[in-house]
Amino acid sequence: MARVRDDYRSLTGAQKAAVLMLTLGEENAAKLFAQMHEDEIKEVSAAMATLGPVAASVVERLCQEFASQISAAGNLVGTFESTERLLLKTLPRDRVTQIMEEIRGPAGRTMWDKLGNVNEVVLANYLKNEYPQTVALVLSRIKPDHAARVLQLLPEAFAMEVIMRMLRMEAVQKEILEGVERTLRQEFMSNLARTQRRDAHEVMADIFNNLDRSAEARFLAALEERNRDAAERIKSLMFTFDDLTRINSQGIQLLMRSVEKEKLALALKGASDTIKELFFSNLSERAGKMLREDIEALGPVRLKDVEEAQASIVATAKDLAASGQIVLSDGREEELVY
């Protein structure tokens, strides 16, 4: 449970403004938001969303003229939901979504962390129109593996110029670094947030992944009759329990450590021999024997329970892949060096 803020002196200016906005109510606060600059809206919104409980005594200190009303109301709680409602009173929904995405982001997440999650093709297409010195600064601040993928997508002559600038780069002044961050945030990340739209086939693949097998088969069969190309595209994007074979041994071992053993036993109860062998081959003889005994001890189980367990393990695999802890191969043969 969040600690109640009861020390008036510990509040920042933005937090004090957030308390007052919450005290005024949504309609009055919306009128004030309408008079603010965009940067002010961001600052107050961020403070409001993370404010947590505020003691009534602090509220009284901030707005003495409304002391009687505030005392009756008791404590205030600033939440993401209340902040979003206030913003929607005066700003377009897409702008509110963008602001909320920024303030909901993981704590301490920097612009360079965000760039690390941008597709290398998208980032390269943006950077190729920038000055080589700017590109050198950006590539020096993101992770080396991501920088390498971006670098090889740049025009060769331009990439070489960037490399030379990186080799000669000295300590960057704080003002210059902040200027580049500000430009990236305003010109690149904001545009990316507005223009980035998920492919419809990807959205449907995610939905189909969450259907039970009978519904999935029924919808795919119907879709194949009406649009075979779309059905094939969706199937290629789907990730099912059987697709766990795309994970290497190290990844499977990490996955097994990340799921409950009861859930794994239930999922394997209705799995193919290939998938069972995948998991058993990554266990010691003793651990494999125990898992087999757990599966046998389950007895008859409902197909729905098996599918739910498998879906949960697939979701865990996707989370591990998204965080870079495991790799999901695309099924194509890797280029080998002999």
Image (cartoon, rainbow, N blue to C red):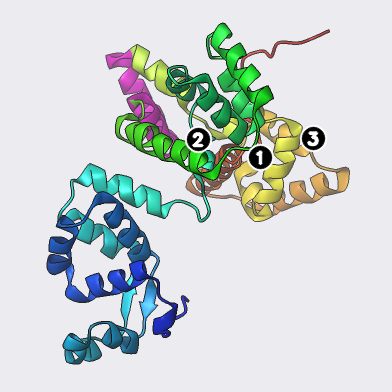
Residue labelled with disc 1: 325
Q: Could you say whether the residue bearing mark 3 is in a helix, strand or loop?
A: loop
Looking at the rendered structure, the kind of residue marked 2 is Leu
Q: Give percent across and percent down for residue 331.
A: 61, 18
Between marks 1 and 2, how big is the CA–CA gap?
19 Å
Q: Which mark is residue 274?
A: none
Q: Which mark is residue 115?
A: 2
Q: Can the viewer see residue 187?
A: yes
Residue labelled with disc 3: 281
Looking at the rendered structure, the kind of residue marked 3 is Ser
**Magenta-drawn segment:** 200-227
Q: Which residue is drawn at 40% across and 32% down?
A: 216
Q: Could you say whether the residue bearing mark 1 is in a helix, strand or loop?
A: loop
Q: Which of marks 1 and 2 is in front?
A: 2
Q: How crowded is mark 3: few (under 14 residues within 10 Å), some or many (20 or more)?
A: some
Q: Is residue 259 magenta?
A: no
Q: Can the viewer see residue 329?
A: no
